[in-house]
Amino acid sequence: MLSLFRYYLLISVVTARLFFNRADGVALVNGTLIRNLALALAITLSVFPNAGIAALLIAIAYVLQVQIATWNSKLSKYIFKAE
């Protein structure tokens, strides 16, 4: 699960940095990671139907999404080129 998330992060940051300006790049990274974290978690949990802690993990995913968006906003001055 975490390795899949790392690939999402890497691909979205590299794509945003190469092809978009700073504002659009931050929006792309936030939109991609925030949306796909819960989706990747749901797909992973659907593979294991006997996972009784699915609701807890999905709740934790939403907490992580806020942290990811915050870190992306703070680190965007280092990741993306200044306008």
Image (spheres, rainbow, N blue to C red):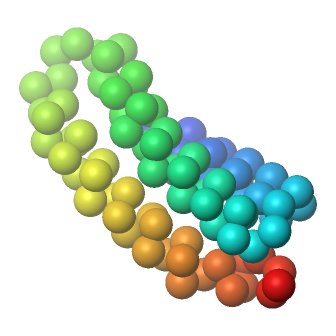
On the image, the x and y values in percent for residue 14 come to 80, 58
Lateral position of residue 57 relative to residue 42, left or right: left
Residue drawn at (22%, 13%) of the image: 49
Task: Give the answer, above or below, for where 25 lies relative to 43.
Answer: below
Residue drawn at (80%, 53%) of the image: 15
On the image, the x and y values in percent for residue 64 come to 34, 59
Residue drawn at (46%, 66%) of the image: 69
- Specify whether residue 14 is in view: no
Task: Give the answer, above or below, for where 10 lies relative to 40.
Answer: below
Task: Give the answer, above or below, for where 83 lies relative to 65.
Answer: below
Lateral position of residue 30 relative to residue 8, left or right: left
On the image, the x and y values in percent for residue 43 come to 40, 22
Closer to the camera in the image, 55 or 81: 81
Quarter holding residue 16: bottom right
- Specify whether residue 72 is in view: yes
Closer to the camera in the image, 64 or 3: 64
Please count the marks in the image: 0
Quarter holding residue 37: top left
Quadrant that contains the C terminus: bottom right
On the image, the x and y values in percent for residue 34 come to 45, 50
The residue positioned farthest toward the left in the image shown: 52
Quadrant that contains the N terminus: top left
The residue positioned farthest toward the right in the image shown: 18
